[in-house]
Image: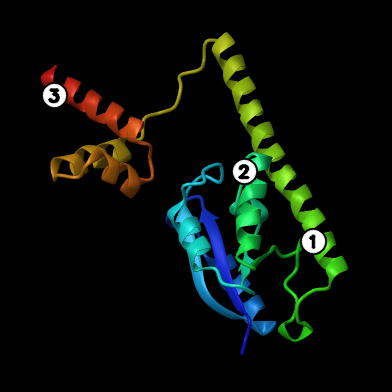
Amino acid sequence: MKPIARIYQRVSTESQDLTRQHSLRAEAEAKGYQVVATYSEKASGTSEQRPELQRMLADLNKGDIIIAEHLDRITRLPMDKAEALMAQIEAKGAKVSVPGLIDLPKAEEGMTGIVIDAMQAMLLKMALYQCRADYETRRERQRQGIEVAKSKGVYKGRKPDIVANAKIVELRAIGYTIAKIADTLNVSESQVKLILKKARTEIVG
């Protein structure tokens, strides 16, 4: 019986090219694994409430391998939460594989030894830290850029997403709840409420 692999990817856009996903599957199958599912979603790595991530965690069985192109596809959470997520995966008896970081062993090689497992655990912890550090560095640079733009009087804030805002109003008009709109469009409920409030103001005005 072939060992089981599951591919998880977090995409930037709904239409993102899935060539790499197909490559990950081919690499896994070439090493003797059976890829039983691919979990793909558009969501932030800083959120624990990702439907496909939670579905994958629920599906995991002992011996399963989770394959991700990069570790930050799985998580950009603070270290304590990132480690808790990895502990949840480990508790299921599953492992994570990231090409070039924690490579997928060939099926016939069996489970890795204690020493290799310890090395992988160390690499994983270092990578988790780096993922979060990179995220926080980008956020800080963005904040600094905004401050500079404000000081020069050229910062105008984010441009409104006219298409997404119109979709929120449209879904509300056909009876969607605020929670369902937020889930459907992958936005916060507070954002939905704000757009609907602005829409009502414009109508009244």
Q: Is residue 4 visible?
A: yes
Amino acid identity at mark 2: Lys
For label 1, count other residues whose C-alpha is less than 10 Å away and answer few (under 14), some (14-19) or many (20+): some
As helix, strand or loop, the secondary structure at mark 3 comes to: helix
Mark linked to residue 155:
none
| Mark 2 vs mark 1, CA separation in Å | 19 Å
Which quadrant holds the C terminus?
top left
Report the mark closest to the observer, 3 or 1: 1
Q: Which of marks 2 and 1 is nearer the N terminus?
A: 2
Q: Residue at x 23, y 30 (%)?
A: 196
| Mark 3 vs mark 1, CA separation in Å | 58 Å
Relative to the observer, which residue lies in front, 8 or 179? 179
Mark 2 and mark 1 in contact? Answer it, CB < 8 Å: no
Asked if 182 appears above or below 113 in the picture, the reply is above
Relative to the observer, which residue lies in front, 19 or 21? 21
Query: What is the x, y in percent for residue 77?
Result: 61, 42
As helix, strand or loop, the secondary structure at mark 1 comes to: helix
The single residue placed furthest to the front in the displayed view is: 91
Q: Earlier in the sequence, mark 3 or mark 1?
A: 1
Asked if 13 appears above or below 151 in the picture, the reply is below
Amino acid identity at mark 1: Gln
Residue under label 1, please give it.
120
Q: Is residue 68 visible?
A: no
Report the mark closest to the observer, 2 or 1: 2
Q: Is residue 120 left or right of residue 167?
A: right
Residue under label 2, please give it.
81
Residue under label 3, please give it.
203
Q: Residue at x 50, y 72 (%)?
A: 37
Q: In this view, does 171 lie to the left or right of 99?
A: left
| Mark 2 vs mark 3, CA separation in Å | 44 Å
